[in-house]
Structure formats: C-alpha cells, structure tokens
Amino acid sequence: MLGNFEYCNPTKLYFGDESLKYLRDELKNYGSRVLLVYGGGSIKKNGIYDEVIQILNESHKEIAEVSGVMPNPTLEKLYEGVNIARDNEIDFILAVGGGSVCDYAKAVSVSVHCDEDPWQKYYLQGEEPTCKIVPVGCILTMVGTGSEMNGGAVITNHETKLKIGHVFGEEVMPKFSILNPQYTLTLPHYQMVAGFYDIMNHICEQYFSGTDDNTSDYISEGLMKSLIHSSRIAMKNPNDYEARSNIMWTATWALNTLVAKGKTTDWMVHMLGQAVGAYTDATHGMTLSAVSLAYYRYIMPYGLDKFVRFATHVWDINPNGKTKEDIALEGLSAMENWMKELGLVMNITDLGVNENMIEGLADSTLIMNGGYKVLERDEIIQIFKDSL
Ligand code: NZQ
Ligand code: ZN
C-alpha cells in the first residue's frame, strides 16, 4: 500500500542553455553580501566564473569567496568556510560546481549562525538546525548527486574516517538552482560516467525496497530506462546536448525526494560506498559501482520479486521458461554489462582498498533498515570481501 506522506519541494529550477540569465532576477531577493563557493578551478577554465562574477558585479553585490572546495568536502574545509562567512557577514551563498560544492554550501548555511559544532550537531547527533539559516542558490556544473534539488550535505571527517550525509529539510534546500546542460560538457570522462552511475544507484536505493504496488517504482523504472538510453548516446558522443540534458534532468528527479514517496528506501550501497570514500577519498560514483553488484547479488534472495521486476521492466529480460532466480540474475548481469560499457570501477581493490582495511571499513559503515535485509557486521564484511 502506498504509505502516507507530505510532499513539497521548494527549490525553483531554471533549466536550459540560457538559464544563467535568471540569476540576475533571483539575486534581487537576497541581501548584498554574497559568498561565492566553488571547487578546484574548473569554473575558471571553462569561463563560468567570469560570467557569474559579471552578473554579481552588475547586481552590485559584495563578493566573498571560498574556493578549493574539494570532491568529498572535508570538515576542516567546512570550518574554513564558516569563518569566512562570519567575517563577511554574508546574506546569501552561491554555489557554483558539482554536488560537493552544493553540499558544502548547505553545510556552511546551517553552521554560520550556529553556536554548536556542526559535526557534532548535524552529523554525529543528526539534529536539525535551530539557528538562522543562510539561503543558498546553486549553479550546477556536474550531474549526479541531485544536490541541486535536495537537502543532502555530505561531509568527510578524515581524522575519524567517517563520511556522513545529513539530509536537511525544506528550509535548507537550495532556493533556486540553475541547470545548464552545456556547463556539464567540459566534465572529464571519468567524472561523467561516475555521475551516471550515481544517478542509477540513487534510483536503485529507492526502488529496491517494499513489496507493494507503488507508483514511485514505475516512475523509477522510467527514469532508469531514460538514463540507460541516454548514457549510451553520451558514451558515443559526449557532446550530444539532447542526451546530456536528459541525463541532467533524470539526475535531478532521481534524488529530489519524489521517487521515495510512499515507500521505504534502502541506501545501503551508499553506506558501503561512503565507508570506502572515507578510507580512500575515491570519486563518489565509483565507490558505489565498486560495491553494488556484490551487495545486490547478496540481498537478491530477500527481495526476489523486485529483482525479477527490475530484470523484466528495466532490462527487458525475457522471462519465458526461466526460474525467478535466473531472471533476477540475468537482470543484474545486464546492469553489470552496462556498467562495464561505461568503464566504471568494478571493485574496491582498484580504489586502493586491501583486505587489511575491511574491518575498519565495516566499522565506518552505517547500517540502514529500510531495504530487503538489515545487514549484520559479518555480512558487511562478506560484501566488502566480495567487492575486492
Ligand atoms: O573542483 P573542480 O575544479 O570544479 O572540479 C570538479 C571535481 O574535481 C569536477 N567538475 C565539476 N564540474 C565540472 C568539473 N570539471 C570540468 N567541468 C565541469 N563542468 O568534477 C569533480 C567532481 O566534482 P564533485 O562535485 O565532487 O562531484 P559530485 O557532483 O559527484 O559530488 C560528489 C559529492 O556529493 C556527495 C558525495 O558523497 C560527494 O561528497 N553526495 C551528495 C548527495 C546529496 N546532496 O544528496 C547524494 C550523493 O549520493 C552523494 O553522496
Ligand atoms: Zn550518490
């Protein structure tokens, strides 16, 4: 049965190759002191930085900057940004980059006016903000995380080897996001395909749970089919605007809370992947691809009917004359073949993990309880071993 829920997504989107022009109007809604947040320099190389600075200057904004937000942003970097934001008494945060930059901007937004330590409050204790929140807007340059239209903010603490995401509520979600598919065309191939798998796995995390007949699962299947189709076009021609724009739109819907409505969700691949990320600092999408198949093959017997449905609805596996197990396994093999077509990292050894690290990885893995199987510690260890 479709469960009871509330649905509200307050993020306004501007989509398309002319979408930056709406920044000017949006900026009128916020104060004069803007914190511009960006990563390691890609936006300076491809010209987006200059375009944004021009609009900020023409809008008479005072600009403070936090640059060098790294993939998998760290707690130290969060403290740095909070200090800059406080020193400049900022009114608004403009994130220009991928999921790391957007996540980081949200983490700063809930910490600037907070007296408590953000790591303790939000990430270890999972509390909600009790302070004034600085509004955030995003200009997205990398497709995958859905951070442009959700409340997620993942921070890595290398000292304690923990990578934790807090999913904040509506008040922290970006006020607006600008999605220009052209901006994603300069992404290195490795990041592009990592993003493709991140999208796929976000959908899987919400799809592989429950046994009911749920509209959200049909929406998920449509998103997965669109992604698989467009990813194959983008692999042949990365500059295919139609494919890249479809993928950008799919990514947003894959994780803007819609397809989780009325059902439980799993998120265990992300927990395994985040532990790998905390140890290796590897690219997020690749940490997921490296553990996924071992995980799904392990839990398949516990959610067999959904895996059969995945095989037939998403991968068009012909079920005639086959057992449920065979159909389900064929579906996972079809996903594996697609992952190899994309050139994803298929095991954690290639990300720098070795057998001696597995106990530590298991310690860093948070256990979720919404999927088909609540994993025990020895099962987590087994899945990591199967992923080597
Ligand atoms: O730093 P720069 O120089 O900008 O380079 C970045 C970075 O090295 C580069 N890049 C981005 N756009 C580019 C570009 N290079 C050339 N041209 C462009 N247009 O790509 C690299 C990766 O960027 P990053 O933002 O780290 O990637 P992604 O969007 O995958 O974000 C990953 C972070 O998001 C978190 C992950 O854990 C990770 O920390 N997640 C956030 C989620 C959420 N908010 O809900 C959910 C996800 O599951 C994920 O956990
Ligand atoms: Zn993800």
Image (spheres, rainbow, N blue to C red):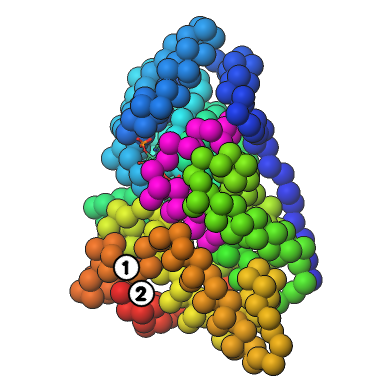
Which label was assigned to residue 278? Answer: none
Q: Position of residue 168 (x, y in %)?
A: 55, 46
Q: Is residue 373 visible?
A: no
| First to last magenta residue range | 177-202
Q: Give the labeled residue for mark 1.
A: 348
Q: Amino acid at mark 2?
A: Ser
How far is mark 2 from mark 1, CA to CA?
6 Å
Q: Within the image, what quadrant is residue 202 found in?
A: bottom right
Q: Position of residue 61 (x, y in %)?
A: 49, 11
Say whether residue 187 is magenta: yes
What is the tally of numbered marks visible in this picture? 2
Q: Amino acid at mark 1?
A: Ile
Q: Give the labeled residue for mark 2.
A: 387
Q: Residue at x 40, y 54 (%)?
A: 284
Residue 290 vertical position relative to residue 318 in the rendered view, above or below: above
Say whether residue 226 is magenta: no
- From the image, which quarter does the N terminus lie in? bottom right
